[in-house]
Image: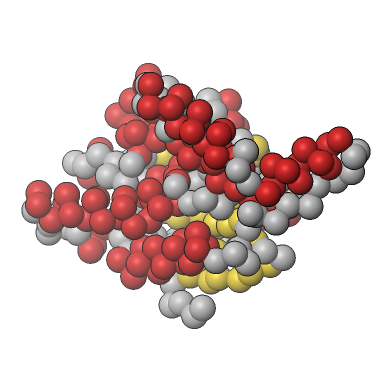
Amino acid sequence: MTYQNILSELQGQTLKVTINREQKLNALNKATLAELAEVIAFAAERDEVKAVLLTGAGEKAFVAGADISEFSDFNGVQGEELAANGQNTVFNAIENCPKPVVAAINGFALGGGLELAMACHIRIASANARLGLPEVTLGLIPGYGGTQRLAGLVGKGIALEMIMTADMISAERALAIGLVNHVVEPQELIPKSLEMLEKIKQRAPLALAAAIKAVNASGTGKSGFETEIREFGNCFNTSDFKEGVSAFLEKRKPVFGGK
């Protein structure tokens, strides 16, 4: 696949996706969002892709935000369409991707950039990362799922503090509040992310997809538990379940086929 704004490379069944607008601090414009939508759809559908690593080019920024110039003259209807399209095709698509998606956060993750990282299943941050949602300084609020995902990750109180103050926080603070899973030195960011994905890829692919679906349903009350029960039951119908049990009883490592 050839893109203008992102780089996409398959490395040992991990699709490494790099937002490649370093001179613009990897800001999300319409073209970049369209390419992200395409590459995430590709990853979700293709058997050769077992996991996705998402990062930004260079050390200054994961994604420093959205390209404000593209929507500076929008009205309310256009604003709603912008948010709905982005959420449906990119942010929700990442969150609901059946393949595990890890965000490797290098440098600034602000506004839409932090929303992009939060849509991923796991976040690993460089020690020099700075994270925040500054939209209220523009007279806006986060529109790509940020209000919902941030509150789910760190709780309502801290989410409202971050959104209403518009302050950036350090990687260590992000780790302390549960916004990121790990903090590593800059040179360790990609190796650590790939190491985690290598471990995850050894697990049963259909069970991973089921776990993603069930966890995403959390916080929805009874339907979340119903989703877990249904996905748990579905796992019993897979060849991977038979292989996992056989390997456990035979004291060997399982070899999962994703069926």
- The extreme top residue here reads 157
Q: Looking at the figure, which quarter contains the C terminus?
A: bottom right
Name the residue rendered at 19%, 59% in the picture.
71
Q: Is residue 8 visible?
A: yes
The quarter of the picture where residue 46 lies is: bottom right
Residue 152 versus residue 233: which sits nearer the camera?
Answer: 233
Name the residue rendered at 50%, 63% in the picture.
45
Name the residue rendered at 34%, 57% in the picture.
89
Residue 41 versus residue 30: which sits nearer the camera?
Answer: 41
Locate residue 226, reporting x and y percent. Answer: 43, 27
Q: Is residue 128 visible?
A: no
Locate residue 136, reporting x and y percent. Answer: 25, 38
Locate residue 23, reporting x and y percent. Answer: 45, 68
Locate residue 169, reporting x and y percent. Answer: 48, 34
The quarter of the picture where residue 124 lies is: top right
- The extreme bottom residue here reads 2
- The extreme right residue here reads 251
How many marks the image carries: the answer is 0
Q: Is residue 218 left or right of residue 55?
A: left
Query: Would you place residue 103 above or below residue 165 in this image?
Result: below
Name the residue rendered at 22%, 55% in the picture.
82
- The extreme front residue here reads 237
Residue 228 versus residue 95: which sits nearer the camera?
Answer: 228
Q: Is residue 254 left or right of residue 27?
A: right
Query: Would you place residue 148 above or below residue 107 in this image?
Result: above
Query: Would you place residue 220 above or below residue 142 in this image?
Result: above
Q: Is residue 146 left or right of residue 259?
A: left
